[in-house]
Image: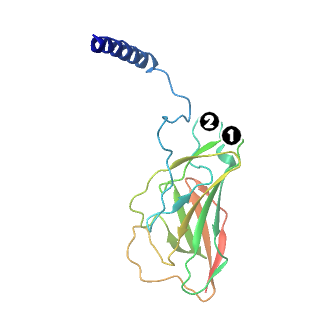
Amino acid sequence: MGAALLLVIAIVIGGFAAVAGVVNAGQPSPAGAAPSGQPAPSAQPGGPEGPAASSSASPSAPSAGTGCDQNLVTVTAATDKPAYASGENPLLTLKVTNGNKVPCEINLGSSQMEYIITSGSDRIFSSTDCQSDATDLVKTIAPGQSETANFPWQRNRTVQGCAAIAAQPGAGGAYYVFTARLADKNSPRAVFQLN
């Protein structure tokens, strides 16, 4: 008898849940809402194919309808030192800052980033030349906060298509320019020296 009563209660509750699911099926979920119990995406350290993103907030192309003004999202480039001794590899940093008064969703994936090094008119390196597996990583940056992604440059040259190239960048006090790109935004130039 007790088992039969439990079965009837389970059927009634299950039927209510099914009806509630049908009623709510056409309702949009709130913007930016994630299913409860689901972990937020985290940045994965990058290897030779891509940069490593570290979180201090969250970046990507702002979503439509969020009130996020793309013009107030800025990209900057920096190196960890102004000059490097022989055998020392520069650490290149791309930083995205949300200058809006509202949170912005930004795609910080390797599909959107490029680290470019030049010397005069000579294009030395691009992180996308040998990139084999570009990915998206959408994060939310709070107002006034930043997101950074680091890329250790191995002092190598690359060409589009990743063809083998024996030439190495010159040292001996030569100056180089690092520019970071995120989607269609380019950073101001960061100058550094290789000894």
Q: Quadrant of the C terminus?
A: bottom right
Determine which quarter of the picture holds residue 191: bottom right
Q: Tag 2: residue type?
A: Thr
Q: Which residue is mark 2?
A: 66
Determine which quarter of the picture holds residue 30: top right
Which residue is at 54% across, 34% downward? 33
Q: Earlier in the sequence, mark 2 or mark 1?
A: 2
Which residue is at 69% across, 45% downward? 143
Which mark is drawn over residue 178?
none
Image location (x, y in percent) of residue 22: 40, 17
Q: Quadrant of the N terminus?
A: top left
- Label 2 and label 1: CA atoms lie apart by 8 Å
Q: Tag 1: residue type?
A: Val
Secondary structure beneath dot 2 equals loop
Q: Which residue is mark 1?
A: 102
Image location (x, y in percent) of residue 98: 67, 49
Which residue is at 48% across, 83% downward? 168
Residue 192 vertical placement versus 24 (above, below): below
